Image (tube, helix red, strand yellow):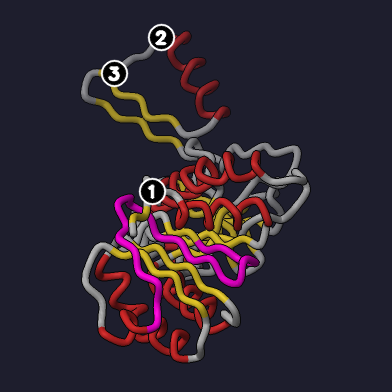
């Protein structure tokens, strides 16, 4: 089959620029020349793949990974490796590419987007709280993710109470997990203010000041010094936010006093 001079020059130019796949009259021409065309003036941002030691560049237009001191990039079936983010890149046999790089989770980008979305949601929750603080430079909060970690933080805060503990829980399953800890603190003569939507055991009924909760929330206030709020109470999407900021602690206490949330 004959090709015009213009077509051949176009093919040559495309080959110089990178990978090319041209189809015409049932003829496929595949050209793979040189390392991946990666140009970076500064180190790219990287994100760790969850549950691994592998990092990837979140830019959706490239596939670049960092692992074990090297940068890795696939182009089809060909792998490239470099000591520096800006090259030089060299072809490396697939058998020499670490398994952690080749067999990374296929949904690693989807996981990243979910994590980023969750952080953005928490940031949106924190923004009005940040505006309420006295000083914009104060470290106002710590974020605890996942129901096991949230429960652990709640139990630690309950155990640390010495004078007064305010607890507002609208989720029964979450309350039942903390009920034994609340009984222990009540027996230590810590003043316990408890708002829940369900019946409680006789020990708590005996020691605590109990109200019915009519809003949806989960708040702990310890000794008027520390507050914990939980945005969800089940699954890995649960987030707990703790703070010692005076304004935020006072806001947590006001939920107990507000008839829109708690009724005697």
Viewer-closest of 195 and 177: 195
Residue at 55%, 21% (x, y): give it: 13
Dot 2 corresponds to which residue? 4
Whether residue 63 is situated above or below residue 176 in the rendered picture: above
Of 27 and 178, nearer the camera is 178
Magenta region, residue range: 207-228
Q: 222 left or right of 86?
A: left
In the rendered image of this protein, does residue 250 appear above or below residue 168?
above
Whether 114 is drawn above or below 201: the answer is above
Q: Earlier in the sequence, mark 1 or mark 3?
A: 3
Q: Position of residue 112 (x, y in %)?
A: 45, 50
Q: Is residue 155 magenta?
A: no
Element under label 2? loop
Mark 3 and mark 1 in contact (Cβ < 8 Å)? no
| Residue depicted at 42% across the width and 63% down the height | 102
Tell me, for residue 175, which label it has, or none: none
Residue for badge 1: 259
Q: Of helix, strand and loop, which one carries label 3? A: loop
Q: Quadrant of the N terminus?
A: top left
Q: Residues within 10 Å of mark 3 (few under 14, many from 20)?
A: few
Residue wearing tag 3: 1
Task: Using the numbered discs, state the Cα–Cα distance from disc 3 to disc 2 in whole angstroms.
Answer: 10 Å
Task: Name which of mark 1 and mark 2 comes first in the sequence.
Answer: 2
Q: Position of residue 217 (x, y in %)?
A: 38, 55
Tell us which disc is closer to us: 1 or 3: 1
Q: Residue at point 62% right, 66% down?
A: 224
Evaluate whether residue 99 shows in this view: no
């Amino acid at each position: 089959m004959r090709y015009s001079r213009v077509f051949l020059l176009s093919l040559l130019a495309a080959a110089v620029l990178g990978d090319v796949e041209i189809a015409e009259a049932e003829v496929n021409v595949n050209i793979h020349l040189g390392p991946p065309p990666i140009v970076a003036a500064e180190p790219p941002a990287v994100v760790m793949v969850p549950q691994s030691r592998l990092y990837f560049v979140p830019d959706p237009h490239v596939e670049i990974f960092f692992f074990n001191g090297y940068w890795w990039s696939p182009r089809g079936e060909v792998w490239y490796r470099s000591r520096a983010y800006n090259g030089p890149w060299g072809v490396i046999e697939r058998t020499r590419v670490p398994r952690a790089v080749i067999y990374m989770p296929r949904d690693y980008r989807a996981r990243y987007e979910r994590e980023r979305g969750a952080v953005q949601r928490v940031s949106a929750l924190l923004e009005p709280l940040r505006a309420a603080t006295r000083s914009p430079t104060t470290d106002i909060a710590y974020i605890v993710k996942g129901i096991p970690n949230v429960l652990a933080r709640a139990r630690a805060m309950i155990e640390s109470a010495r004078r007064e503990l305010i607890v507002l829980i609208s989720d029964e399953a979450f309350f039942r997990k903390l009920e034994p800890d609340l009984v222990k603190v009540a027996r230590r003569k810590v003043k316990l203010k408890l708002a829940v939507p369900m019946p409680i055991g006789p020990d708590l009924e005996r020691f605590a000041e109990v109200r019915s909760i009519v809003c949806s929330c989960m708040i702990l206030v310890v000794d008027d010094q520390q507050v914990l709020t939980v945005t969800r109470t089940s699954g890995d999407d649960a987030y707990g936010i703790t703070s010692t900021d005076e304004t935020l602690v006072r806001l947590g206490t006001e939920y107990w006093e507000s008839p829109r949330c708690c009724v005697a």
